[in-house]
């Protein structure tokens, strides 16, 4: 495994840092759902440089750079607290590149690459989160296309996005993952209702209702009932950028500075705690590089990505808790830096697969332990 980056990669990192000077502290990494108008300008500027398609094949307008470039880009974005990676340029576009028709490629890829068109992911439902294959939102054959009815919940950014990347049931309920298909749905279409679900850190998720929403055949991506493998591949593509260590580096720097400014670093117990957190953040860095290493070698990173997510979200919580514990009353004031980080650290272990589900993956796939979970 490589622990360093090449000269060319470091040059790219320097270029990204310089670019981010204008977008530093946009707060999009934590509050993306409340700041999209500003964040979209950043995505358009990235699109103009080709960075939203940095890993896409050249034939689709991408720069075809190896995964290390995406890793560096989103690591620096996280450190700068600029924004999270847009789901459109990653999960959606990469699935269209693999499974979309020629017409879908020519319709969707260009505006996604430029940063103009954005998607939310419509997977989870009230009774189907960890157990996604239980989902009930249906797309039934109707006329030349499909008619969608049902509900989704917890959709990030859906209130600001143009389209939904919808996972819906086209087979029987018993067919579980083998009866699901993927659709592109206009979030402004008749019959679609998007309601806010406020998060306790001031950000927002959404619930979405579908009431006889008609979509054409050309809005289904990939085979009918064939969504499960498409989703698996798309997720695998994104593993090295989903939980970048730059976020943890920045959290720790900010919390240490906040505690120092208040003269709290004379406390030896706190200093020891911070030293432990430095060690933990270096471990997170190593987990991130392990995932990248798999991606570079085109090996599955299931266990590595799960351990990375656990380590990342544990560190996130430990840093925020240290600030709350030692920063006493001031840390608890709503909107203080520790308060914002602490509230965000509570939902990090849930989105993108819960810590319990990640631990089960590590146990089964990493340690070979049998079990039902
Ligand atoms: C910030 C955030 C952003 C999100 N963004 C999106 C989005 O954009 N699009 C989208 O579709 N969804 C999104 N989600 C939803 C997310 O994917 C689900 O919340 C997650 O998969 C967990 O599902 P659930 O909430 O239904 O909890 P459940 O699956 O009901 O889990 C409840 C509890 O049971 C535990 N549990 C469940 N199954 C097992 C098991 N097999 N073994 C051990 N423990 C288990 C869980 O770990 C958890 O503690 C987001 C969630 C959050 C918090």
Image (tube, grey):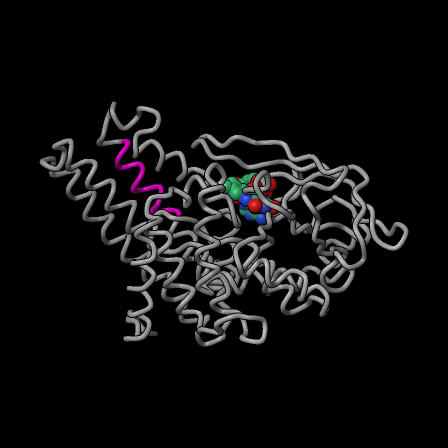
Rendered view: 239 above or below 200? below
* The one of 247 and 111 positioned closer to us in this rendering: 111
Q: Is residue 314 magenta?
A: yes
Q: Does the magenta stretch mainly form a helix, a strand or a loop?
A: helix
Q: Residue at x 78, y 55 (%)?
A: 175
Kindly indicate the quadrant of the structure image that contains residue 29.
top left
Q: How many marks?
A: 0
Q: Is residue 191 left or right of residue 15?
A: right
* The one of 27 and 139 positioned closer to us in this rendering: 27
Q: Position of residue 246 (x, y in %)?
A: 33, 54
Magenta span of residues: 313-324
Q: Position of residue 22 (x, y in %)?
A: 33, 50
Kindly indicate the quadrant of the structure image that contains residue 284.
bottom left
Q: Residue at x 63, y 60 (%)?
A: 231
Rendered view: 366 above or below 262? below
Kindly indicate the quadrant of the structure image that contains residue 289.
bottom left
Q: Position of residue 194 (x, y in %)?
A: 65, 35
């Amino acid at each position: 495994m490589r622990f360093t980056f090449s000269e060319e990669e470091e040059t790219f990192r320097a270029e990204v840092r310089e670019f981010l000077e204008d977008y530093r502290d946009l707060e999009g990494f934590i509050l993306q759902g409340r700041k999209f108008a500003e964040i979209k300008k950043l995505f358009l500027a990235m699109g103009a440089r080709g960075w939203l398609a940095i890993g896409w094949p050249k034939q689709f307008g991408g720069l075809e750079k190896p995964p290390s470039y995406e890793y560096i880009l989103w690591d620096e974005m996280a450190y700068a607290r600029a924004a999270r990676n847009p789901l459109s340029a990653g999960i959606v576009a990469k699935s269209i590149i693999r499974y979309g028709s020629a017409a879908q490629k020519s319709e969707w890829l260009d505006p996604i690459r430029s940063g103009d068109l954005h998607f939310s992911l419509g997977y989870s439902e009230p009774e189907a989160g960890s157990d996604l294959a239980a989902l009930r939102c249906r797309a039934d054959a109707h006329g030349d296309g499909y008619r969608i009815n049902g509900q989704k919940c917890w959709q990030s950014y859906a209130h600001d996005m143009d389209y939904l990347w919808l996972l819906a049931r086209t087979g029987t309920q018993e067919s579980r993952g083998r009866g699901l298909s993927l659709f592109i749905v206009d979030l402004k279409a008749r019959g679609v209702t998007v309601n806010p679900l406020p998060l306790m850190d001031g950000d927002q998720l959404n619930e979405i209702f579908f009431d006889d929403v008609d979509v054409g055949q050309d809005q289904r991506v990939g085979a009918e009932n064939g969504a499960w493998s498409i989703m698996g591949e798309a997720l695998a593509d994104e593993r090295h950028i989903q939980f970048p260590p730059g976020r943890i580096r920045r959290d720790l720097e900010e919390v240490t500075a906040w505690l120092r400014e208040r003269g709290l670093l004379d406390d030896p117990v706190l200093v020891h705690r911070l030293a432990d957190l430095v060690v933990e953040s270096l471990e997170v860095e190593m987990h991130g590089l392990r995932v990248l290493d798999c991606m570079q070698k085109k090996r599955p990173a299931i266990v590595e990505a799960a351990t990375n997510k656990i380590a990342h979200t544990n560190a996130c919580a430990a840093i925020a808790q240290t600030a709350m514990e030692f920063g006493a009353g001031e840390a608890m004031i709503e909107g203080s830096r520790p308060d914002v980080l602490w509230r965000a650290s509570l939902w990090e272990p849930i989105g993108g697969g819960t810590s319990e589900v990640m631990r089960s993956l590590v146990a089964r796939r990493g340690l070979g332990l049998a079990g039902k979970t």
